[in-house]
Image (cartoon, rainbow, N blue to C red):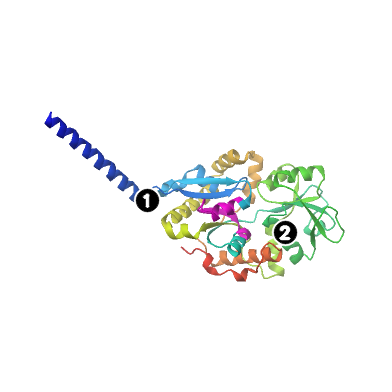
Amino acid sequence: MVRAGWALAFTAVVVVALIVVGVILHTHTPGGSYVIRAATLQGGISTLDLIEAENLTAKYGYPLKVERFQETPEIIAAIAKGEADLAVVPAEMAAKLIETQGGVVIVAAEMLQNQAIIAKDNSIKSPLDLKGKLVGAVIASGTYKLFKAYMEVVYGVPVVEGEKPAPDRVTVVNVPPGSILDALSTGSVDAAVIWEPIVSEGIARGFHVVAPFTQLWRDAESKTNVTGSPIMLVWIAREDFVKQHPDALRAFLKAREDAVRIWRSNPDLVFHVLSRLYHIDRGTFNILYKRVALTSGPLDEDMVKSIYSEWWLAWRGGYLPKPPSSIGRSVFYWG
């Protein structure tokens, strides 16, 4: 009986020791138990869709939790409260957050501008044809403020908010993203300013692109000090996350690069992921796939200059309270 008791005691000690060793080994494997928390806007496409669907951060030892929010202020609130480590947001929103709250770092550029002016009426062929027209847009968005800046700074056409068009200006009425295409169909608005995947859905329904924002950017380059690539989205991260979990950040950025490679090399997989998330058909996807351009690689001087140019336009459009010169280069992550 004594020997049996000693045997049981020895076995218990061995089991406990193995558990302890297992815990220690687990916490010292890449990533340990830390879960990367990433936030995005519901209905907004990004590499995060592929990172989540293909579990790409797990390859580098880190689990991922994705939160999708209905409104962009909810993303900002999640970052401010420490409920998210990273978020993919419009570049101008990142600047506004930096100017008003701080505490975040831009860690990557994500995507070039995919917004566009779309219309049903074929007589609207250029931005200048919008004079005297009623345009639908999400007035609270940075996209609208960029449109306003493009029209006023590049084309010299005033943009005002209201419901009664005037011949010498563009009149903009607020329309939620989900109602934009219906407003065009019914003639409630003459044109609309919106982003993907709604642009491609509109094209698939027979509307035409008056001008993509990439064209507006090129026109701005020829008439203003705008330079570089028209970056639309960036990844921001909480400063404390960057400092306390540098390996997790590096793992996420590697996973993002993997997602870019998948996007460029495997459109069938991309369609499978996006159709499940956004309920788009193959025809709409084929349009979207040609229109969306992802950026790759770490932040560099050209990307930073491009982001500052985008901020300048957002400031001229009234979205940013201060000129971008007030934002120092320390807000960029250089690895």
Provide the secondary structure element on which disc 1 rests: loop
Query: Where residue 147 is drawn, which disc sits there?
Result: 2
Residue 235 in percent (x, y) is at 55, 56
Provide the secondary structure element on which disc 2 rests: helix
Residue 89 in the magenta stretch? The answer is yes
Q: Is residue 322 left or right of residue 105?
A: right
Q: Vertical placement of 137 versus 182: above or below?
A: below
Q: Is residue 218 left or right of residue 14?
A: right
The amino acid type of the residue labelled 1 equals Pro
The disc, 1 or 2, on the residue closer to the chain's N-terminal end is 1
Q: Is residue 291 left or right of residue 37?
A: right
Residue 56 in percent (x, y) is at 46, 46
Residue 8 in the magenta stretch? The answer is no
Most distant residue in the top direction: 1
* CA separation in Å, label 1 and label 2: 44 Å
Q: Mark 2, residues whose alpha carbon is within 10 Å: few (<14), some, or many (≥20)? A: many
The amino acid type of the residue labelled 2 equals Phe
Residue 321 quadrant: bottom right
- Quadrant containing the N terminus is top left
Who is closer to the viewer here, 185 or 328? Answer: 328
Most distant residue in the right direction: 167
Q: Is residue 297 shown to the viewer in this render? A: no
Residue 77 in percent (x, y) is at 58, 53
Q: Is residue 235 shown to the viewer in this render? A: yes
Query: Where residue 30 is drawn, which disc sits there?
Result: 1
Q: Is residue 272 left or right of residue 251?
A: right
Q: Vertical placement of 10 versus 125: above or below?
A: above
Where are the magenta residues, as a range?
74-93
Q: Vertical placement of 36 versus 145: above or below?
A: above
Q: Mark 1, residues whose alpha carbon is within 10 Å: few (<14), some, or many (≥20)? A: some
Residue 311 in percent (x, y) is at 64, 64
